[in-house]
Image (cartoon, rainbow, N blue to C red):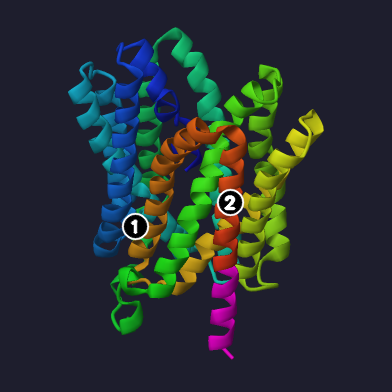
Amino acid sequence: MLINRSGTMVVAFMSVYCVKQLHFTIEQAGIVMTIFGAGSICGGFFGGKITDKIGFYDLQVGAMMSGGILFIVLGYQHTFLSMCIGAFVLSLCNESVRPANSSAIAHYSSPENKTRSISLNRLAINIGWALGGGLGGFLAAINYHLLFWVDGGTNILAAIFLVILMPKSGIVKSYKKAGVPEIRASAYRDKTYLLFIGFGLLFFTCFYEFMIIEPAFYKIAWHFSLPFIGFLMALNGILIAIVEMVLIHNLEGRRPGLVYIYTGVFMGGLGFVLINIVPPSAIAATLIVVLITLSEMLSMPFMNSFWILRSTDHNRGQYAGLYSMAWSAAMIIAPTLGGLIIALGGFSLLWWIFAGLSFISGTGYFFMYRSIARANL
């Protein structure tokens, strides 16, 4: 996953590439990105279904290989229609790896270390994103086509390493076991999990909104310098790399996961409130980023372990797929919704609304915890 995500740069620079290199309008670039997001949702759905049919191993290899080839092919598309088609097919194939990868983590981890296993994977993804983003800016300055070749090449390289270092012969095909309880036969009939995903969609949208609006807000509203904004953006990844594994190691198993989830989501809501009530300053901005990063580190690993506990070997791909689809949907909703809110009432209204959505999500998780705790008495 570290190798795979270290080449993640095409998506980050896709809109710039469409406008600067292909001379699309801003609206056309937005449509391409929206279609890419729609492909991600479909990839999560079909990836989950296929994982339960053939297992996580074959899908991971196939998705990374096909995604790598399609990244390179996309770099040679120059018309609006071909870019839209290419972006959808690429995203469909490339994002189908997420449910398979999540299922693989669940397969290889034990009940005692599953949340730490998830955090380790998140660490690889975050480091990869940081490396890919930094390298992508350098390569884009030389030649945009290099982005597609490097992104595609790392996908293919990750697939090759998976085949060499973790051969399929070592996999126990436990996903074919029978005897799954009827209530858990399908993730789409697990009402508690569907509610969990609904609250998650609210939180993911709020979190993703902060990540994409943060640079513009700190520049336009708080008038920070670009180097300091870069530091604030990097601080999230730095804290995750240094703190998350230690934090999860000390918390895992001490309290039910939902306790950490609703606590983390409430922290995120508090961070949005602080943006509106504290005077603009470097200290305040740093505190807000730290608080929202803590929200992410506390909630998201335990969100993953929640669906792992509810799933079985037979239907784990569906549970992972729904979780992946919620993230992909948030990536589509957040930019559109955020732009509309800012147009109506500025940044202040934006942060109040997303604070409210975070508190709704946290409250939902709190009552879900109470309901499950009472049911287990």
The label on residue 120 is 2
Relative to 41, 231 lies left or right = right
Tell me the amino acid under the disc marked 2.
Leu
Residue furthest bottom in the image: 377
Few, some or many C-alpha atoms within 10 Å of disc 1 (few <14, some 14-19, many ≥20)?
Answer: many
SS assignment at label 2 = helix
* Residues tagged 1 and 2 counted as in contact (Cβ below 8 A): no
Identify the element where label 1 is drawn.
helix
Q: Is residue 276 left or right of residue 144?
A: right
Coordinates of residue 330 in the picture (x, y in percent): 43, 46
**Mark 1 to mark 2: distance in Å?**
18 Å
The quarter of the displayed image where residue 352 is located:
top right
Residue range corresponding to the magenta coloring: 365-377
The tag earlier along the polypeptide, 1 or 2, is 1
Q: Nearer the viewer, residue 76 or 343?
A: 343
Label annotation for residue 56: 1
Residue visible at 34% across and 31% down?
33
Residue 327 higher or lower than 279, as above or below: below
Residue at image position (24%, 25%) is: 83
Q: Where is residue 365 shown, x and y percent of the image?
A: 56, 67
